[in-house]
Amino acid sequence: MRVIIAEDSVLLRNGIARLLEDAGIDVVDQVGDADALLAAVAAHPDVDLCLIDIRMPPTYREEGMAAAVRIRADHPDVAVLLLSQHVVGTHAAQLLGQGAAKVGYLLKDRVADIDEFVDTLHRVAAGGTAIDPEVIAQLLTRTTDPALDRLSPRETEVLAAMAEGLTNAGIAARLFITERAVEKHVRSIFTKLDLLPDAHEHRRVLAVLHYLRAQAGRS
């Protein structure tokens, strides 16, 4: 896997690069701001994933998030995994509400297991999603999409676990229920969110991001 790291802290950037290289991941470029990130993606069209800090120079607000939105629009084959100290809602909705896979959003303080982090990179690069449960929890409280009101508390828990990229087996282990029960809840979520079978769409991703589309439309 080929990765570009965008992080303004040189020490953190170099540390992440060393960890990824030790895990057999090819770090093709390291940059410190959003403009350099966009230039790096253009220079490495075969890159698989960009690991992006949300807040970078010059304003340290949401330059990384804006760059991620542009990368997903201009280079749909390139995955993006965002790292942040805080949940940034509006632009997260814009990014995730596109209905695309290959997106991850993790809080830095909750990245504690290196092997799990590397597995997450591979999963997102392969077309999956990985959204921190705290991100989901905060964004869920901000949306007014009435479709979500149809979900039961257990279905909401399953939806949040789906957002983390967990398989049905992983969700079953997390919630201490059977895989058959998970399958039942997932089918119910699809039905309540009016997500009909479609060979051209990933219903798990669309279910996770359903409520974010409403936010994206208001931003």
Image (cartoon, helix red, strand yellow):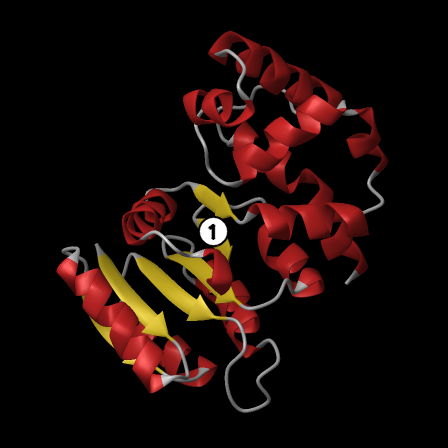
> What residue is pinned by disc 1?
103
Q: Amino acid at mark 1?
A: Val
Mark 1 nearby-residue class (10 Å; few <14, some 14–19, many ≥20):
many
Quadrant hosting residue 69: bottom right
Question: Which residue is situated farthest in the top direction here?
Answer: 180
User: Where residue 172 sits in the image (x, y, percent)?
Assistant: 49, 20
For this view, does 140 lie left or right of residue 34?
right
At horizontal 51% and vertical 67% (from top left) the residue drawn is 70
| Element type at mark 1 | strand
Assign the C terminus to one quadrant of the image.
bottom right
Is 145 on the left-hand or right-hand side of 211? right
- Report whether residue 193 is seen: no
Q: Position of residue 5 (x, y in %)?
A: 33, 71
Give above or below for 14 relative to 179: below
Q: Quadrant of the image for the N terminus?
A: bottom left
Residue under the point 46% across and 80% down: 34
Residue 52 occupies quadrant: bottom left
Depicted 70 relative to depicted 92: above or below: below
Residue 132 versus residue 217: which sits nearer the camera? Answer: 132
Residue at horizontal 48 percent and vertical 56 percent from the top: 110
Residue 115 position (above or below residue 175): below
Q: Residue at x 62, y 50 (%)?
A: 134
Q: Nearer the viewer, residue 52 or 179?
A: 179
**Residue 123: x and y, percent?**
35, 43
